[in-house]
Structure formats: structure tokens, C-alpha cells
Amino acid sequence: FFVVPMSTTFLDPKVVQLLGVFSVTAVACAVAWSLCRGQAPKVIVAPVEEEEASNPKTPHRKFCWDTDRTKEHVPCWDPATMDYLGEAPAMTPEQVIEKIQLARDAQKCWAKSTFVQRRYLLRIILRFIVENMETIAKVACRDSGKTMVDAMFGEVMVTCEKLRWTISSGERYLKPEYRTSGIMNMHKTSRVEFTPVGVVGAIVPFNYPFHNVFNPLIAALFAGNAIVIKVSEYASWSTKYYSRVISACLKAAGAPADLVQFVTGYGDAGNALVTGGADKVIF
């Protein structure tokens, strides 16, 4: 590492500050990765132009609330520039229930996985994040309008820490816990066992597009569950990239392909997730 004096004329102080933030975040993520030592294959997910570049060369028309919002599609735009980014499907209740069933079928297999297998999956995800943090942050910025500083600290670094903690400590808190049986039952033993609930439904807000997806996903998958994530209609564009990342990591880990499902849409889609058969719903 080297220190660039604030009085240096060839760099703007804001640029120096931003470089410092990136350096701190990179170090923190690297530490998280080193603390979770284990073999994890490299996963490559090629981003498209809009996901890779902060200022894409291809010009975008501006978003118009009056004409771009329809019942069939969820419009996606960059709140910072109002650039129209495309659209996501507004899923029907029937489509949401199909997603839940796909996740349920996949969870039956994943419920039998060992903690070794689950840690392996999380290590793969952690390695991908550490190696692709800039693209991850750019995608979050475009979908939420936040700054790169906020994305690096508020999304990337906290997600790395949750992965680190779950990999290192998760199993300890999911192992059976023995309880005293009392004198009258001294010939017996008592214990509390933690078993997967099945399909977890998560309805997440728009403000942290990356962390709000991976936060419930990490806990659900490590506990042996499948998860169906209903993202906000104000942050649906980023799931195109994040879903490809998750699919690639699941494949690399040998986990069921349908273990993680995404739902995009409006209130009726969220209602279908709550009432359509999920075993546990979190917000």
C-alpha cells in the first residue's frame, strides 16, 4: 500500500478518498476470504454493458412513469439519471406458486446435504464476491441510485462478513442442543434439534439490492432450505445479474439448480408468496 498526499495536484481529493474506500473494502473482503480458507472453484459470470460500465456507451431514453409502467411488466430505471434500463416480468400469482413448487422440489434434496456441502457453496459465493465486487457495486448503484461508497460498505462488505461468520460459526448454532431431563427422567436424554423448515419466502425492499437478496439467501441455504425472493418493483433490474451469479454458484457447488427462485412483480405477486405455500416468510 502507498499513501497519496491530499495536496497532490494530479489527483482530486474526492478521487483520493474514493480510492481509500475501495482499498479498505478490498482489504476487508480479502480478510473475510482468507478467514474462510477452503477450496472453492472460480466462477465466471460475464456482465453485459449496462452491468459493467458506470456510464454505458449506448444511450438510454429517460424513464416515463406515465407510459412505462404496465400490468404485464415492471419498468426498471436508474434513479440517479432516470435512464430507462428495461423491464422485468410482472409475475402472476399462478407463476409465483410455480416458483414455490420448483423450490420445494429442489429443497427435498438440499435438506439432506451436509454442513460441509453448505459451507462449500458459501465459499464459492464469497470468492465470487471478492473477485467481482466492483461490478456487483455498480449494478447495485444503477438499480438504486446510490453511490459506490455506499454500495461497497453497505452491501459488499456486510455481505462478506455474513458469509464469513456463517461459514465459520453457522454449524455450531444448528447442531442439536442437549437439555437436562430432570430427576424423574434420569434414564432418558433430551435434546433440541434444528431441522430445515422447507421453502423460505423473502420479500425484500429496494434500498440495498445486493445485500437484501444475499442476506436471507445465506441463512436459508445454510440451514438446508430453499428460498423464493420477491424483490421490490423499484429494484428488479439488478436481479438479472444477481440471479445469473447465484445460478452459476449453485452449479459450481453441485447444488440443485432450482434452490433459489426470484419473483418480480407488484402486490399480487407478494401476496401469492405469502399465501401460496411458503413455509416461512421473512421481510
Image (cartoon, rainbow, N blue to C red):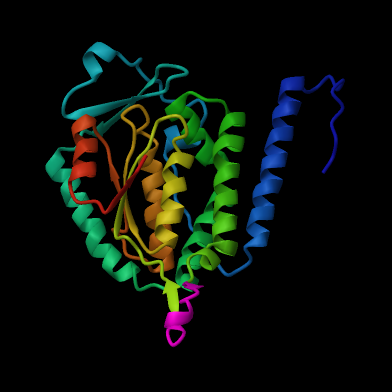
x then y, percent, for residue 53: 50, 32
Q: Is residue 109 above or below residue 281?
A: below
Viewer-proximal residue, 216 or 236?
216
Residue extending farthest to the left is 94
Q: Is residue 33 left or right of residue 48?
A: right
Which residues are drawn in magenta?
176-188
Q: Is residue 150 left or right of residue 185?
A: right
Q: Is residue 205 above or below residue 216?
A: above
Q: Residue at x 19, y 44 (%)?
A: 275
x then y, percent, for residue 7: 87, 20
Q: Is residue 260 left or right of residue 52?
A: left
Q: Is residue 181 magenta?
A: yes
Q: Residue at x 59, y 56 (%)?
A: 164
x then y, percent, for residue 12: 75, 20
Displayed quadrant of residue 257: bottom left
Displayed quadrant of residue 19: top right
Q: Is residue 142 magenta?
A: no
Q: Residue at x 40, y 56 (%)?
A: 220
